[in-house]
Amino acid sequence: MAHVSVSNARKDYGAFKAIKGVSVDIGDGEFVVLVGPSGCGKSTLLRMIAGLEGITSGQIQIGKHIVNELAPKDRDIAMVFQNYALYPHMTVAKNMGFSLRLKRMPKSEIDHRVGNAAKILGLENLLERYPKQLSGGQRQRVAMGRAIVRDPAVFLFDEPLSNLDAKLRVQMRSEIKELHQRLQTTTIYVTHDQIEAMTMADKIVVMKDGLIEQSGSPLELYDRPSNLFVAGFIGSPAMNFIEGSMGEDGFKTVDGLLLPSERRPLDAVIYGIRPEHIRLDPDGIEVTTIVVEPTGSETLVLVRLGGQTLTCVFRERIRAAPGDILKIAPIHDAVHLFAADEQRITT
Ligand code: ATP
């Protein structure tokens, strides 16, 4: 097990700055998810920690060692990739034991470790199969098995579930989380999927354009996003942002409609409310229904508020047709206010 510390890391590809000075501390046994839109630099940062990319400046420490100059094989890490990278001509058992054979570990020890990992992952009956005889989920488990047998200080995952269908992704998500609870190995996991990040992480690091926007526990990020980007990125469907300005009676939208707000900071120009924090209220604001999407467990309703469109998620079933008027109100303590510089207003 090990603590990982990245200090002011930078990565330039020629004139292009992919990582622009990133510091992050990952505690011993912690499960940290790096998340952000395509191109934000999350894979680059992970590959820098793995040693697959050089570091332009800054420092990376794994356990007691500064690893900037160490080869990947000397960093005591194991990485699981999106495409699994299994050897097609080797059985599952041989694939899992491959790195240990390279290290010239005794066969009895290899068999023991492979057997153990197979048991953890439910692969005991598949050890003699070849990768092409496996399902996508089984291949993914073999890729994880290869990492587990090495008993590394740190697991690194690069979008390991993105080649799986939606149902399997949800299942494997739980399996990886359970695996972490069992092994308690420090884990750094890259994904662009904020639901994966929310459900798996002890700590989420949200990245954009080579920088960290915010890091914290999933619920800290959901409850108190520090800026518009994080507020819009975390949560699904995304938070509604309504433009306007703060007045003495509440927040006045650009169309002159009044929205309730307990706090009245005069610099607020964006009123944020999550779809699930809007309720129906006979004394609420009138909106016009655009689209109604029942999912069975809840109802997604798109409405028009003045010139702006809002997404609402109601737990109850709503019988509304396009054009119908609904009356809605935000849950008061769930309103987020942002200033013109896109930062959260905290007071
Ligand atoms: P995705 O989710 O699409 O994989 P990402 O956040 O993981 O995105 P990276 O792969 O880390 O993004 O890439 C970050 C930026 O660095 C991108 O703009 C990418 O084009 C650039 N980049 C990555 N590798 C190289 C390279 N070898 N040479 C030049 N630019 C690169």
Image (spheres, rainbow, N blue to C red):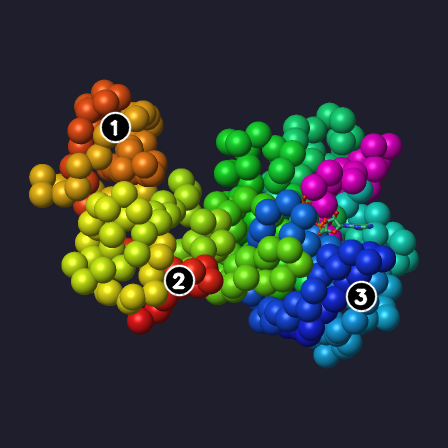
Magenta segment range? 76-94
Camera-nearest residue between 165 and 133: 165
Between 174 and 343, the one lying in front of the other is 343
**Distance between the Cα atoms at labels 2 and 3?**
36 Å
The residue carrying pointer 2 sits among few (fewer than 14), some (14 to 19) or many (20 or more) residues within 10 Å by Cα, namely some
- Residue 180's spot in the image, x, y percent? 56, 56
Whether residue 311 sits left or right of residue 186 in the image: it is left
Q: Which amino acid does label 2 sit on?
A: Ala
Is 235 positioned to the left or the right of 285 in the image?
A: right
**Label 1 CA crowd tier, 10 Å (few <14, some 14–19, many 20+):** many
Q: Is mark 3 on a helix, strand or loop?
A: loop
Q: Do the residues labelled 2 and 3 touch (CB within 8 Å)?
A: no
- Residue 55, disc: 3
Q: Which of marks 1 and 3 is in front?
A: 1
Tag 1, which secondary structure?
strand
Q: In this view, does 97 lie to the left or right of 1?
A: right
Q: Which of marks 1 and 3 is nearer the N terminus?
A: 3
Q: Where is residue 47 in the image (x, y as percent from the top left)?
A: 75, 56
Q: Which residue is drawn at 68% across and 68% down?
A: 21
SS at mark 2? loop
Question: Which residue occupies the foreground of this view, 177 or 305?
Answer: 305
Q: Does the magenta stretch include residue 92?
A: yes
Reading the image, the residue beneath label 2 is: 339
Of tags 1 and 2, which is closer to the observer? 2
Between the C-alphas of marks 1 and 3, the distance is 52 Å
Residue closest to the far left: 283
Quadrant including the C terminus: bottom left
Residue 7, percent across and down?
68, 74
